[in-house]
Image (cartoon, rainbow, N blue to C red):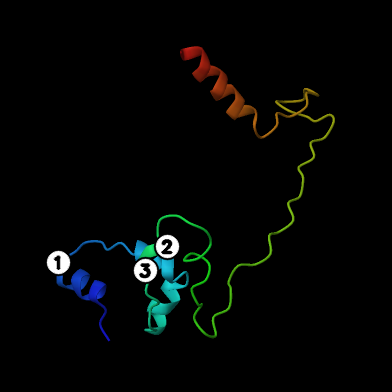
Amino acid sequence: MTLEWQARTESGAADAVAFSRAFVANHDLVERFRRSASLCEPDDATLHGGGERGYTDYPALAGRRSRVSAPRRRTSRRWPSKGVVDGGSSARPASPSEPARAVARAGAAAF
């Protein structure tokens, strides 16, 4: 089955196609395209506002498993209390955010 969007892009009638309405009703839209599965129709009455109805209650594709994994635990960066930097000084190394702070200070001074 050739989908309308596919026919338009292949024929050159369109360079890009937006799927905003289809995505609201099909959060697994890419997988549905892969499987040539049917799409849920969006409920126009719930598209722009209201509660959860129309955003979280559309059925998922049968047999689809989530690819989202549990977040990895972030390890903290611990800087040594004393370090050797720039040829032997015992200054503590700058934190990773120090360059960002310097840029922010320079930008603030420009205005």
| Residue at mark 2 | 46
Q: Secondary structure at mark 2?
A: helix
First in sequence: mark 2 vs mark 3: 3
Q: Residue at x 70, y 28 (%)?
A: 94
Q: Secondary structure at mark 1?
A: loop
Residue 45 picture location, percent across and down: 38, 63
**Cα distance between the residues tagged 3 and 1:** 20 Å
Q: How many marks?
A: 3
Outermost residue on the right side: it is 81
| Residue at mark 1 | 13
Q: Residue at x 85, y 31 (%)?
A: 81
| Residue at mark 3 | 22
Q: Is residue 44 above or below residue 59?
A: above
Left or right: residue 72 versus residue 20 is right
- Which amino acid, by three-letter code, is at mark 1? Ala
- Which amino acid, by three-letter code, is at mark 3? Ala
Residue 107 picture location, percent across and down: 50, 19
